[in-house]
């Protein structure tokens, strides 16, 4: 699913009006109805509801929502925040219609006009929508502050008032902090960015059937991967396949005290369908690996505690494997850096690079040029900062991310809520699955194993990253459903992986 910017959303609105065709006021009615259908499923009819409307089309939505909720006998009061010299046409139309059915419309011009809000009440926030383009000031600001202080449940229409949909807010900006955001048709970029978490709450999309052809043709670098889109990437297995069909992966992982990372990656790789797996670990990890992961072959390094790439055991060169994964539990010993220096130039097929291998790349950036094209890097934000530089806000971080993936011809999975997969051609695919329970040691090692397995099975790097991140998050969601997010372990996530 595409993520469009504010100008594109406005043009999409117009394209819908023109091509469907539909009158703008009826499109607003459709949006309001879809909101009310969601609202009625969520909140009982007795819920006292206060709707705050601005004077633009977001406010127009609020007025139409008020009328539709009154029809359903919700106890509704409407407050219009008078912030602009003039109202939008569709606001005025809905204002006239609402006045026919209620006399409970009040106007907020000064602070005394703001009603008291109680904890059993619901606030619908329709003050500003995607048209917000400057910081909230004056009575808009005061009203937003009052709503944020109140114990009421707050539901934002389209986007929290004051939050810009596609550009950074300033740190001091006053923005609604909703419990829910109901956004129309497509996600807005702002909803997916970590710094905006408190200005979004739980969010849902409402399909208001905007013009599909316009969406299909609109250029954008940003996508939000829906479950059905991720599942489409999944390949069926041929009945006549054998273990050779699914590749032979080589995992280079572990150091003294961090063998668990190697074990978790290896187990995840097997659970993600690799045909064969060989793991190279320091000598101290040999018994651990063989006992913990009997399905994998093990090549002990000649070094006792860290990886050097030297092994006394016969076996193919790393380049001969279908793919290589490197990083979990690796450490940053000089011998390990030397191994990377020798190894990377010998590899041609995409590999997976994680954890300390990323930190070694960050400290030796010349090595970035040695990565095979389309390799997948899986940094968390701190590792990504080490690879690039500090950023002032999430939008700058996205620019750095796209730029890094394009310049180095790699796929970058920036881990976090809505993990972002950046591709060598400049696209960013945000992932929809996952929950805070995944923020625990070892889940990154699991992702590395999954990605290696998908590359080994012949998925191209972008497919592997999008599908792998999706499946990893979904496994975490399954665990959270069964036992709650707190106390989830990386091993739980491996067990919950499913590929159908
Ligand atoms: N685009 C679409 O597909 C649809 C849009 N609809 C609604 O229309 C909204 C967008 O409406 P508008 O473009 O009229 O914009 P808004 O209603 O968000 O804002 C109204 C106007 O307020 C002014 N403004 C900006 N920042 C301000 C601030 N900080 N303080 C005071 N005034 C400020 C701007 O001039 C802006 O145009 C959407 O968020 C959505 O709720 C829906 O009616 C249905 C369809
Ligand atoms: K709003």
Image: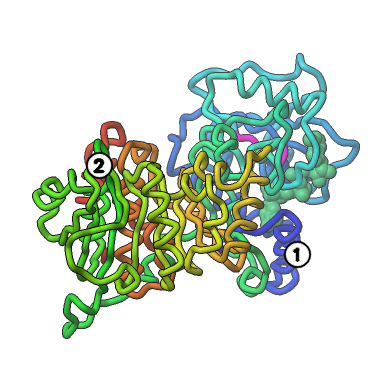
Residue 443, x across and y down, in percent: 32, 44
Is residue 244 rendered to the left or right of residue 197?
left
The residue identified by callout 2 is 305
**Quadrant where the C terminus is found in the figure:** bottom left
Q: Is mark 2 within 8 Å of ligand 2?
A: no
Q: Is residue 126 magenta?
A: yes
Kindly identify the residue that appears in the image at 71 percent across and 37 percent down: 169
Viewer-proximal residue among 210 and 253:
253
Query: Is 462 situated above or below 392?
Result: below
The answer to whether one can see residue 322 in this image is: yes
State the SS at label 2: loop
The answer to whether one can see residue 489 in this image is: no
Checking the image for residue 14, the label placed there is 1
Q: Quadrant of residue 488?
A: top left
Kindly identify the residue that appears in the image at 67 percent across and 46 percent down: 396
Q: Is mark 1 within 8 Å of ligand 1?
A: no
Is residue 390 rendered to the left or right of residue 1?
right
Report the span colored magenta: 124-128
State the SS at label 1: helix
Q: Residues within 10 Å of mark 1 (few under 14, many from 20)?
A: some
- Determine the residue located farthest toward the right in the rendered image: 85
User: Where ligand 2 lies, by image quadrant?
Assistant: top right
User: What's the image's color scheme?
Assistant: rainbow
Q: Is residue 29 magenta?
A: no
Residue 332, x across and y down, in percent: 40, 42
Residue 420, x across and y down, in percent: 51, 53
Q: Quadrant of residue 487?
A: top left
Viewer-proximal residue among 53 and 354:
354
């Amino acid at each position: 699913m595409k993520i469009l910017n504010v100008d594109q959303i406005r043009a999409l609105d117009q394209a819908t009006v023109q091509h469907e065709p539909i009158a703008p006021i009826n499109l607003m009615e459709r949006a309001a109805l879809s909101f009310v259908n969601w609202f009625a499923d969520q909140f009982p009819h007795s819920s006292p509801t206060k709707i705050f409307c601005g004077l633009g089309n977001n406010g127009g939505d609020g007025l139409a929502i008020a009328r539709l909720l009154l029809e359903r006998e919700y106890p509704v009061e409407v407050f219009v925040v008078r912030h602009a010299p003039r109202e939008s046409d569709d606001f005025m139309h809905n204002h006239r219609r609402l006045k026919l059915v209620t006399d409970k419309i009040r106007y907020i011009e000064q602070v005394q006009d703001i009603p008291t809000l109680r904890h059993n009440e619901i606030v619908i926030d329709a003050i500003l929508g995607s048209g917000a383009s400057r910081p909230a000031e004056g009575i808009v600001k005061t009203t937003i502050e009052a709503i944020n202080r109140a114990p009421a449940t707050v539901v934002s229409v389209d986007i929290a008032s004051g939050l810009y949909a596609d550009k950074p807010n300033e740190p001091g900006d006053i923005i609604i902090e909703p419990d829910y955001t109901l956004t129309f048709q497509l996600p807005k970029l702002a909803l997916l960015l970590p710094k905006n978490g408190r200005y979004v709450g739980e969010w849902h999309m409402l399909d208001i059937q905007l013009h599909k052809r316009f969406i299909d043709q609109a250029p954008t670098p940003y996508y939000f991967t829906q479950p059905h889109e991720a599942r489409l990437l999944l390949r069926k297995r041929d009945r006549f396949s054998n273990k050779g069909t699914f590749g032979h992966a080589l995992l280079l992982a572990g150091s003294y005290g961090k063998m668990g990372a190697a074990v978790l990656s290896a187990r995840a790789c097997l659970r993600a369908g690799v045909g064969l797996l060989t793991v190279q670990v320091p000598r101290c990890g040999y018994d651990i690996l063989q006992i913990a992961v009997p399905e994998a072959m093990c090549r002990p390094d000649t070094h006792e505690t860290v990886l050097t790439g030297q092994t006394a055991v016969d076996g193919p060169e790393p380049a001969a494997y279908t793919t290589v994964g490197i990083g979990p539990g690796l450490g940053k010993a000089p011998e390990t850096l030397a191994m990377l220096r020798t190894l990377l130039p010998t590899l041609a097929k995409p590999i997976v690079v994680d954890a300390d291998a990323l930190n070694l790349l960050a400290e030796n950036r010349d090595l970035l040029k040695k990565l095979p094209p389309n390799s997948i890097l899986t940094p968390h934000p701190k590792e990504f900062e080490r690879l690039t530089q500090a950023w002032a806000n999430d939008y700058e971080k996205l620019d750095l991310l796209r730029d890094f993936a394009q310049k180095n011809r790699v796929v970058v999975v920036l881990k976090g809520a809505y993990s972002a997969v950046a591709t060598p051609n400049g696209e960013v695919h945000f992932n929809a699955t996952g929950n805070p329970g995944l923020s625990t040691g070892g889940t990154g090692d699991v992702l590395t194993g999954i990605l290696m397995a998908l590359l080994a099975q012949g998925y191209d790097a972008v497919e592997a990253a999008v599908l792998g991140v999706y499946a990893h998050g979904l496994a975490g969601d399954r665990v959270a459903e069964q036992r709650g997010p707190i106390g989830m372990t990386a091993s739980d996530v491996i067990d919950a992986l499913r590929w159908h």
